[in-house]
Amino acid sequence: GLLADRPEVAGVDVVAVPPSEIIVSITERVPVAVLQTGNAFSLIDEDGLVIGTAANRAEARLPLIDGGSEAVNNAVFSTVTSVLSVLPENVLAQLDHASATSVDSVELKLVNGQSVFWGSAESNVAKARVLEAMLGMPAKEPAVKVFDVSTPNAPVTR
């Protein structure tokens, strides 16, 4: 149980393979967001567990979930983290904030000021793919303010 106490380890499986092999597989917890409490920045995983800290906002390089440590305790929080956990790294890197007033209104703010209306956590994977594609498109004039992927088969920009 050396590793089991470490917060960044989700699980350790030890399998003995006769005659003399032992296979140890470690499931790592992956940080998907940052929570700010006072001047402290905590890195949290999809389950809301704190798995590390960052010295400052810039070092964290993950979206900040609004609401501080209080945010972890509500249903909205797990909706937000489930959304963040499906986003590819290149999209996560562009996010500044993630928030939701209800489980159906997840919203992401990009570092460049654009926002993404995600909606509910349904069809997360499809929405992530659509968003990645939209973010990869050349910028339009006038610039897009909102990417709406709440209906992934009919995404809208406005």
Image: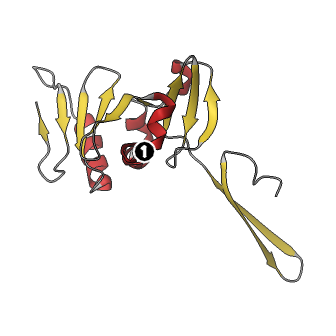
Q: Quadrant of residue 4?
A: bottom right
In the picture, measured across the screen, residue 103 lies left or right of residue 143, that is: right
Task: Look at the picture and state if 33 lies above or below 4.
Answer: above
| Residue drawn at the location 52% of the way across and 20% of the way down | 57
| Residue drawn at the location 76% of the way across and 50% of the way down | 5
Task: Look at the picture and state if 11 lies above or below 73.
Answer: below
| Residue drawn at the location 10% of the way across and 20% of the way down | 142
In the picture, measured across the screen, residue 30 lies left or right of residue 150, that is: right
**What quarter of the picture does the N terminus occupy?**
bottom right
Q: Is residue 32 visible?
A: yes
Residue 48, horizontal then vertical, whole percent:
52, 44
In the picture, measured across the screen, residue 50 lies left or right of residue 102, that is: right
State the residue in front, 95 or 44. Answer: 44
Task: Look at the picture and state if 59 lies above or below 29.
Answer: above
Q: Which residue is mark 1?
A: 81
SS assignment at label 1: helix
State the residue in front, 44 or 140. Answer: 44
Return the residue found at the far bottom. 18
Residue 114, horizontal then vertical, whole percent:
25, 25
